[in-house]
Structures are given as C-alpha cells and as structure tokens.
Amino acid sequence: MSRAVAIGGFDHVDALSIGGNSPVLIQTMWKDSLGFSDLEGKAGEAIIERIAALKRMGCSLLRFAVPDLEAAEVLGNLAEMVSMPLVADIHFDYKIALRCLDFPIAKIRINPGNIGSRERVEAVLSKAAAKNRPIRIGVNAGSLPPDLRDRVDSGDLSQAEALVEAAERELAIFREFDFSACLVSMKASSVADTIRANRLLAERTDVPLHIGVTEAGPLIAGVVRNTAALMVLLSEGIGDTIRVSLSDTVEREAIAGREILACAIDSGGAAVDRAGSQGQGVKIVSCPRCGRNSFDTHGFTEKWQPALYAMDKNITVAVMGCVVNGPGEARHADLGITGVGNKVLIFRYGKVIRTIDAADADGAFREELGQL
Ligand code: SF4
C-alpha cells in the first residue's frame, strides 16, 4: 500500500489525503492560459463557477501550467478564490516554484532533477516542507533524460524501465533532502508502457502514484486507452489519483475519470476498498436509439449531462428513445424521460407520471429532478 500524503487543509483550501487507504482522487488540467483579466468581473465568476461544477462532478484537484512568474501570480490569485486544491505545473524554473509557494496553491509539480544547483533544489524543498505542500514528480516518456532515451533506443532498457529509472532518480533527490511529501506520475501514450511502469514502481516504493495515459487522443480514443490502462492498475490497487487526459474539455476528463472509477469499484478488486464516495452520484443510462425512437436521446443527454453529473444525489436517470421499450428497459431508474409523437413522457421506475408537450420537456424534467 502507498503511504498517505496530506494535501490542502490550510486557509480555505479543502483538506485531502492522497494514498494509503484514501479514496482514489480524480484530477484534470486546465486547458488554457490564464491572465489577470480572466479573473475579473463576469469572466472571473464564470471560472469560479466552472471550478465549483467540476468539484460537484467529482474532480478533487485541478492543475494549471505555470510557464512564468506572471502565470504564478495569476494562479496564486485564483487559489485565493476557490476551495478546490490547485496544482502548479512548473518546468525547470525554481523561482516560479518558490513564488507559487507564497500562495494557497496546494501542490506543485516539478522535477528536482530539472531545477539546477543543489542550493536551488534545497530552497524549493525546504520552503515546500515548511508550508506543508507536497510535490509531484512528473516523468514523461516524451521527455526522458538523454542517457535513458539512448538506452531505450539501443534496446538496453524498455520504455517502462526507463520511466521507472527516471522517477527513481528524482526520488533519490527527495530522499537526500529528507522530503517525504512527494508523489510520482509516469506517463506514456502507450497503454502497455503505462501499466508496466506503474506496476514496476509500485513494487519498489510506497510513494503515491498519479496514473493515466498521456496524449491519449480525442474523446473516444482517449477514454478507451485510459480505461484499458486504469482498470488494470486500479484492480491491482495501483494508483492514488487519476487523470483521463483527453483532447477535450476538463468536464469530460472529470466525467471520464468518475465513470472509470465507478467501473473499477463495480467490477470488484482493490479499488472497492478505497471507494469512499467515488462511484456515487447521478448515474445516467441512455439508450443508443434505434428506428423505433420518438425522442432525441442523444441531444437530450448531451444537453443535460454536465448538470446531472454535477448533482449531489445518488440516483439513476434514464433517457430513452421510445415509449414501447424505454420505460420497461429503464424500470430501475429513479427518473426517466422518453417521447411518443410530439409528446414527452416522464416516468419513475418504469411508470409514466407525466405527459407533456415537447416544448415543456426541460422544465418538467428539471421540476421532477428537484423533487428526488
Ligand atoms: S428504448 Fe426504444 S429507441 Fe431506444 S434502443 Fe430501445 S427500442 Fe430503440
């Protein structure tokens, strides 16, 4: 079992624990750069609401790229405004890491091997330790140290072994400075390398692991590749936080993570012991639609998905295409909707409770949801 690392829990920031017996956490990464103007007025309110909605969807940590000192200031200001623990993703520049640690930013991702001199490493690690901020090492198959890359190219090391070696070099630096609040991710775009590398490192260390397939592709490819890797690792008890990296929105990354965790829990194995509140919340069932349909299940599901996933209820909601089979196929649903001609039916546990005009479907559905 991995060791537990505390995160947040200061100022207004949520207190979390990563690793040990704590629930596996979902994280995502903000897709755009942020400027000061993005945090002002209506734009700022929209970002705060978007982060609050991500939290309601089950996302626990949100990472931002911090390429320069101005970005550190902007992220620092945002961290003052939200309770979700924010993570600063920094490459190379130790001054950015030091500045981030002045703000209520809950975690930083930086590789000590990239910081430079011993003094700089010490400055970052001692400030992080004094402020109780964990650090994640992020090793990526696309940016292995040159000597390890050469050994992979010559066949001396597998990609997975090289990822582990790179992570262990970084961990050795943490050990040297007696810094234990660290986590590791080893990311590859290959499912097999992701599984092998994480299995290998999990055998050798108790450092919590952040797992996921990186550069996994657009929505469908990305979800499939991540599911393939994460289900294997989670079933073996490997992985303390997950990110489903997609060429798509943060919301879809969070929803995909939540669905993968729910599947891992549902299928048994080690993930069940660490379920916590994961796998709970609204479960959406929707029919694929066929020639019998009289209701646009695809459009309705797409429109309602973000709001449903953001609800704090443990219910099943069904969106079905026809009255002939729909309510029967979804008779376990707490609430369902389907159509017949130009009318829409709302049902509970397979029994129709309301018949309305199509134009009133959203309003009536919202009302019934509110009563659950
Ligand atoms: S609920 Fe109706 S429309 Fe949907 S798949 Fe079943 S038969 Fe087809």
Image (cartoon, rainbow, N blue to C red):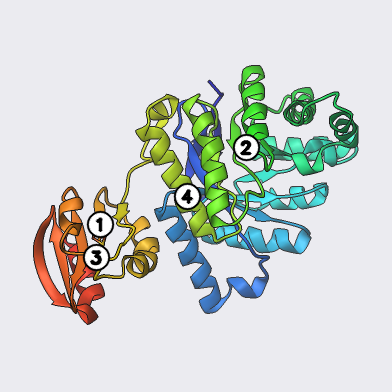
The residue mark sitting in front, 4 or 3, is 3
Find out if the beta carbon at label 2 lies less than 8 Å from the nearest ligand 1 atom. Answer: no
The residue mark sitting in front, 2 or 3, is 3
Find out if the beta carbon at label 4 lies less than 8 Å from the nearest ligand 1 atom. Answer: no
What kind of residue is marked 2?
Val
Tag 3 secondary structure: loop
What kind of residue is marked 3?
Arg
Q: CA distance from mark 2 to mark 3?
A: 38 Å
Residue named by callout 3: 292
Task: Give whichever of discs 1 and 3 has the lower sequence position.
Answer: 3
Task: Give whichever of discs 1 and 4 has the lower sequence position.
Answer: 4
Q: In front here: 2 or 237?
A: 237
Tag 4 secondary structure: helix
Q: Is residue 184 visible?
A: no
Badge 4: few (under 14), some or many (20 or more) residues near its Cα, within 10 Å?
many
Task: Give whichever of discs 2 and 4 has the lower sequence position.
Answer: 2
Q: Are marks 2 and 4 in contact (CB under 8 Å)?
A: no
Residue named by callout 4: 256
Residue at image location 61% in from the left, 30% down from the top: 195
Q: How many marks?
A: 4
The residue mark sitting in front, 1 or 3, is 3
Q: CA distance from mark 1 to mark 2?
A: 32 Å
Residue named by callout 1: 318
Query: Which numbered dot is residue 202?
Result: none
Residue 49 in picture, x, y percent from top left: 46, 66
Residue named by callout 2: 191
Q: CA distance from mark 1 to mark 4?
A: 18 Å
In the image, residue 372 sits, relative to residue 108, either above or below, namely below
Tag 2 secondary structure: helix
